[in-house]
Amino acid sequence: MDFKNIAYTKKEGIATLKLNRPQVFNSLSMATWSEIGAALDAIEADNEVRVVILTGEGKAFSAGDDISEFGEIAKDPEKIKWLARMVPQAMDRIEHLKKPVIASVNGMAMGGGCELVLVSDIVVASEKARFGLPEVMIGAIAGVAVFKLPHIVGVKRAKEMLLTGDTIDAQEAYRIGMVNKVVPHDQLEAETLKMAKKISAAAPVSASVTKEMINVTSGKLDLDRSVDIGNRVMTTADFQEGFAAFMSKRPPVYKGK
């Protein structure tokens, strides 16, 4: 597969999907989301794949959605609808993928990058990792995290993170249950691979059904509602103002419209 925004490799039953835009801290462009979808298609259809590692190239896991595209997207209702559906669909596919997914968080995981962590099955984080959901500060919404985060960290802590946009470090993410394991930065790849090999040794059907049944009883993503709220927020004047303020490096002036 010929990808430009991600790198996809497979070895000994372990597929690695690496976000590969290090020059922009692996921000998630529309093209990146499309390539993630194509990689998930390949992974789902490949019986040799037992487990998936999701990580980022360079210093970041992902800085979140590519804000530089928002100006163009916000002017086109069809692009708004496409993005509002594409992002939660990709997250939903990761959550319901038949193969377990390990997020190997090598640096910052912000916005959509943090949401990718939330829908992964297991999270191994470098001590340098940082997590945050700053969408409300720029007039947007973390349309996946609003469903996933409260179940993982509790309602009160989720509201604090989502309403303040504050960033937390790897140890705090571990303390509140967002992360399974924090490791020294130079050991991240080895520790993630060690975890992946353990999981890949499990019976594939058993692992798949176990993941499925845990998802049934947990706070799973409501895809239709996520798409709806994303569409609603991205068509507001406040969203336009938040984007303009961010790009101009000035405080936003929101009017609640």
Image: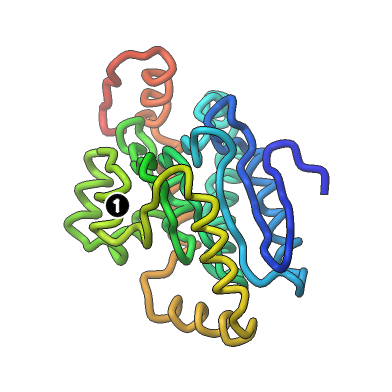
Q: Quadrant of the C terminus?
A: top left
Above or below residue 208? Residue 232 is above
- The foreground one among 200 and 43 is 200
Residue 231, visible in the rendered structure: no
- Residue found 41% across the figure and 46% down from its top: 126
Looking at the rendering, which quadrant does residue 19 occupy?
Answer: top right
- Residue found 74% across the figure and 58% down from its top: 10
Give percent across and percent down for residue 92.
Answer: 54, 62
Residue 14, visible in the rendered structure: yes
Q: Is residue 39 left or right of residue 256?
A: right
- Residue found 40% across the figure and 34% down from its top: 236
Q: Is residue 102 left or right of residue 124?
A: right
Q: Is residue 42 left or right of residue 27?
A: right
Q: Which residue is mark 1?
A: 173
Mark 1, secondary structure of its residue = helix
Q: Is residue 90 left or right of residue 186?
A: right
Give percent across and percent down for residue 161.
Answer: 25, 46
Q: In the current view of this chain or complex, which residue is farthest to the right?
A: 1
Above or below residue 208? Residue 3 is above
Looking at the rendering, which quadrant does residue 254 occupy?
Answer: top left
Give percent across and percent down for residue 114.
Answer: 42, 47
- Residue found 29% across the figure and 56% down from its top: 174
Give percent across and percent down for residue 255.
Answer: 26, 27
Colour scheme:
rainbow
Mark 1 burial class by Cα count in 10 Å: few <14, some 14-19, many 20+: many
- The foreground one among 157 and 193 is 193
Q: Amino acid at mark 1?
A: Ala
Count of numbered badges drawn on the protein: 1
- The foreground one among 129 and 251 is 129
